[in-house]
Image: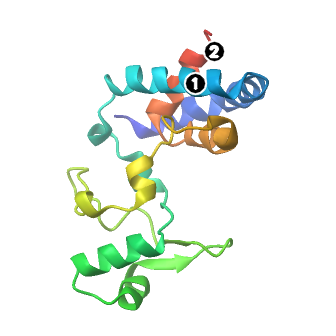
C-alpha cells in the first residue's frame, strides 16, 4: 500500500468526512451503529491490515493497567520496567508509546505481541463498536490513519 498517496487522499477528503459526521449526529444512534457495523464487515472483507499497518507505524494505543501488566509478563519484566522501557504519559495522563512506529511491529507488519496486544489495538479502528455517536470525532481522525475507515466514510457518503 502506498501510504504517502493514501495520506494525501485522506487529507483532501477530511472536510467531507467532518461534514458527514455532522449529518450522522442527526441520525438515530441505533441506525448509525447498524450502518457502521454493516460497512465495517463489508470493508474488512476486502482490506488486508497486514498490507498497511499504518496505525502501528504512526499512532499509539492507550495502554491500560491490565495491558501493561500482561505485556510486562510477556517480557518477564515488572510493570514499572515495561513502562520505563516503552511508555510515557501523554497530556491527558494516559500511557502511550514513547515512539512510533510501535516497537512490537515486525518488518512484515505482523504484531510481535499479537495475542497479548493492548485492548485499544484489539478494538481498532473502532468502527464496529456500539455507540458510534460518541466516537464520531475519533472516527473522523481515523480516516487519516486507516484506509478501511477512509473507505467506510466514502461508502457512507452514498447513504
Do the residues under discs 1 and 2 have CB atoms within 8 angstroms?
yes
Query: Residue, x 36% and y 78% (percent of image)?
Result: 69
Residue at the location (39% across, 62% down)? 118
Circle 2 residues within 10 Å: few <14, some 14–19, many ≥20: few
- Against 19, is 79 above or below? below
Find residue 157 and report its horizontal and vertical position in percent. Answer: 63, 15
Question: Residue 51 placed where, x, y %?
Answer: 28, 38
State whether residue 138 appears in this view.
Answer: yes
Q: At which x and y percent is residue 40?
A: 45, 27
Asked which quadrant contains residue 10, the reply is: top right
Q: Position of residue 131 (x, y in %)?
A: 62, 38
Residue at image position (35%, 46%) is 53
Which image quarter is the C terminus in? top right
- Relative to 103, is 133 on the left or the right? right
123 up-or-down from 20: above or below: below
Residue 5 makes an appearance in the image: no
Asked whether, in this view, residue 3 is left or right of residue 8, the answer is left
Q: Can you say whether 90 is above or below 25 in the image?
A: below
Colour mapping: rainbow
The residue at the far front in this view is 30
> How far is mark 1 from mark 2, CA to CA?
6 Å
Secondary element type, mark 2: loop
Q: Residues within 10 Å of mark 1 (few under 14, many from 20)?
A: many
Pick the front one: 133 or 21? 133
Reading the image, the residue beneath label 2 is 157
Image quadrant in which the N terminus is located = top left
Q: Which mark is residue 153?
A: 1
Element class at badge 1? helix
Q: Is residue 125 left or right of residue 106?
A: right
Tell me what residue is drawn at x 71 percent, y 29 percent: 21
Amino acid at each position: 500500500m502506498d501510504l504517502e498517496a493514501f495520506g494525501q487522499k485522506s487529507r483532501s477528503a477530511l472536510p467531507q468526512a467532518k461534514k458527514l459526521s455532522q449529518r450522522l449526529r442527526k441520525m438515530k444512534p441505533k441506525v448509525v451503529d447498524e450502518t457502521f457495523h454493516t460497512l465495517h464487515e463489508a470493508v474488512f472483507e476486502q482490506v488486508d491490515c497486514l498490507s498497511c499497518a499504518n496505525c502501528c507505524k504512526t499512532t499509539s494505543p492507550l495502554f491500560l493497567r491490565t495491558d501493561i501488566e500482561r505485556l510486562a509478563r510477556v517480557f518477564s519484566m515488572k510493570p514499572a520496567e515495561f513502562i520505563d522501557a516503552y511508555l510515557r504519559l501523554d497530556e491527558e495522563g494516559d500511557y502511550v508509546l514513547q515512539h512510533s512506529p510501535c516497537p512490537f511491529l515486525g518488518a512484515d507488519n505482523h504484531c510481535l505481541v499479537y495475542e497479548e496486544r493492548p485492548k485499544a489495538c484489539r478494538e481498532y479502528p473502532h468502527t464496529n463498536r456500539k455507540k458510534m455517536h460518541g466516537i464520531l470525532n475519533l472516527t473522523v481522525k481515523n480516516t487519516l490513519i486507516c484506509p478501511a475507515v477512509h473507505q467506510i466514510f466514502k461508502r457512507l457518503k452514498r447513504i
